Image (tube, rainbow, N blue to C red):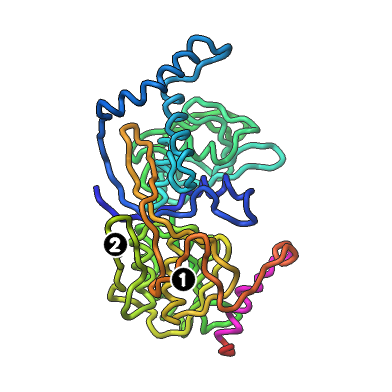
């Protein structure tokens, strides 16, 4: 399948946060295509790779310790080869996180339809079923204690992410939950279904009833449809201007980025792409935008990356929006995504993208028109000076 996409791997995002104050490190988002390929090495490649087997066979014969499985060794070899490219965005992704990435970009996943939370005191994982979803239909009740998933017992050290990975799976498959209720243990079988994960949240601001606030968490296949609903609802409730919050949004689908940017622009292009040996390609604004003239503020910060920067760069170049906040991350390289035989994936950098005016984003980021930092004291006291500045800008025009 051929589909241009720009992906954000949040797992890699979190892993490398320690390197920067608020960076995406190994991956902040991708421009690329989905491909399924079945390439075999030619004779020269096989000959050159014989050195690897020579070395590895020595290790297998002499190493004083446990030898990993062939799959683990293969994964390690691929990762090591990727590392020689010195490109943080060219990477190998094992099947489980690859499936999570795909589900995230589709805006849905196979799950049981229940919220999970961990009790800090006891370390127990508690369930809270969503009304009408599979867990609710199977008889799960609020505050049931989850003891095991498919006979795999949970411990105090089992993280919520690990539990989520156990509970999620292919749509239509069954998962057996061992729960504790009223001191008794019982097993409940739940059939996984498609659980939609909204990417857009919106509301009329109480302190400014003429301003519609929209937060986009990621660019998924469903984002533009959700945005259409948001604009319709906010306009009906009296919104005359908008605050579009892309803080902490590390990216998503390229097609979604073009659609989202087109909500605010009548004409022009959204981005330029420069691919090796292919020249420049542009992505035009699409018809049907619902907020073409209303005053607009875009909130950005160091977590705003990739697809978010595509939208922000276009709106800033065309002077359609005022950017408020802090400098964005700076992710502007293009990757191809290859789906491999065992459902793992590789991402390969093949090009760079630029704003409509030709401004480079990669390694630079977007500079806000009005810079407003957030301090640790602000966070501790639940203050949002960036949102407050956006409100005052829309109300006062400066």
Q: Position of residue 181 (x, y in %)?
A: 58, 35
Q: Position of residue 391 (x, y in %)?
A: 58, 81
Given contact means CB atoms under 8 Å apart, are the residues at marks 1 and 2 in contact? no
* Circle 1 residue: 312
Where residue 301 sits, quadrant-wise, is: bottom right
For the image, the number of numbered tags is 2
Q: Residue furthest right?
A: 377
Q: Which numbered dot is residue 279?
A: 2
Does residue 35 appear left or right of residue 159 in this picture? left
Question: Of circles 1 and 2, which is in front?
Answer: 2
Q: Label 1, secondary structure: give it.
A: helix
Whether residue 385 appears in magenta in the rendering, the answer is: yes
Q: Is residue 121 above or below residue 328?
A: above
Q: Position of residue 31 (x, y in %)?
A: 37, 55
For mark 2, does the 10 Å Cα neighbourhood hold few (<14), some (14 to 19), or many (20 or more) residues? few
Where residue 276 sits, quadrant-wise, is: bottom left
Task: Give the residue drawn at x 54%, y 68%.
Answer: 300
Q: Is residue 304 above or below residue 113?
A: below
The C terminus, quarter of image: bottom right
Whether residue 221 appears in magenta in the rendering, the answer is: no
Does residue 40 appear left or right of residue 303 in this picture? left
Query: Depth check: 26 or 189 in front?
Result: 26
Task: Give the residue drawn at x 40%, y 41%.
Answer: 99
Does residue 253 appear left or right of residue 299 in this picture? left
Q: Position of residue 193 (x, y in %)?
A: 36, 44
The chief SS type of the magenta part is helix
């Amino acid at each position: 399948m051929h589909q241009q996409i720009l992906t954000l791997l949040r797992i890699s995002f979190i892993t490398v946060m320690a390197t920067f104050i608020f960076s995406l490190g190994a991956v902040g988002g991708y421009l690329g295509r989905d491909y399924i390929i079945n390439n075999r090495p030619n004779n020269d490649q096989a000959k050159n790779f014989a050195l690897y087997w020579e070395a590895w066979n020595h290790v297998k014969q002499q190493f004083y310790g446990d030898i990993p499985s062939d799959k683990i060794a293969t994964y390690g070899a691929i990762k090591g080869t990727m590392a020689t490219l010195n490109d943080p965005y060219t990477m190998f992704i094992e099947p489980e996180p690859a499936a999570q990435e795909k589900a995230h970009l589709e805006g849905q996943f196979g799950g049981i339809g229940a919220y999970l939370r961990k009790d800090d005191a006891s370390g127990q994982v508690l369930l809270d079923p969503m009304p009408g979803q599979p867990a609710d239909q199977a008889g799960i009740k609020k505050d049931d204690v989850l003891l095991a998933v498919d006979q795999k017992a949970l411990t105090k050290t089992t993280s919520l992410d690990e539990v989520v990975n156990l509970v999620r799976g292919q749509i239509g498959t069954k998962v057996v939950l061992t729960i504790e209720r009223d001191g008794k243990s019982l097993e409940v079988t739940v059939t996984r279904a498609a659980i939609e994960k909204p990417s857009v949240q919106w509301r009329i601001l109480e302190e400014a009833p003429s301003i519609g606030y929209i937060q986009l968490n990621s660019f998924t296949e469903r984002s533009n449809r959700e945005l259409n609903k948001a604009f319709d609802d906010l306009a009906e409730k009296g919104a005359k201007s908008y605050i579009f919050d892309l803080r902490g949004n590390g990216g998503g689908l390229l097609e979604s980025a073009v659609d989202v940017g087109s909500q605010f622009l009548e004409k022009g292009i959204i981005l330029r792409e420069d691919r090796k040996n292919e020249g420049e390609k542009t992505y035009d604004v699409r018809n049907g935008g619902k907020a073409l003239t209303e005053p607009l503020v875009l909130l950005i910060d160091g977590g705003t990356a990739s697809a978010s920067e595509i939208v922000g760069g276009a709106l800033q170049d065309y002077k359609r929006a005022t950017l408020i906040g802090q400098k964005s991350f700076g992710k502007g390289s293009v990757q191809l995504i290859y789906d491999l035989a065992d459902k793992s994936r590789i991402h390969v950098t093949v090009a760079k993208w630029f704003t409509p005016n030709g401004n480079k984003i990669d390694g630079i980021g977007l500079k806000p028109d009005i810079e407003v930092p957030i301090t640790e004291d602000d966070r501790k006291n639940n203050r949002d000076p960036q949102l407050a500045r956006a409100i005052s800008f829309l109300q006062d025009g400066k």
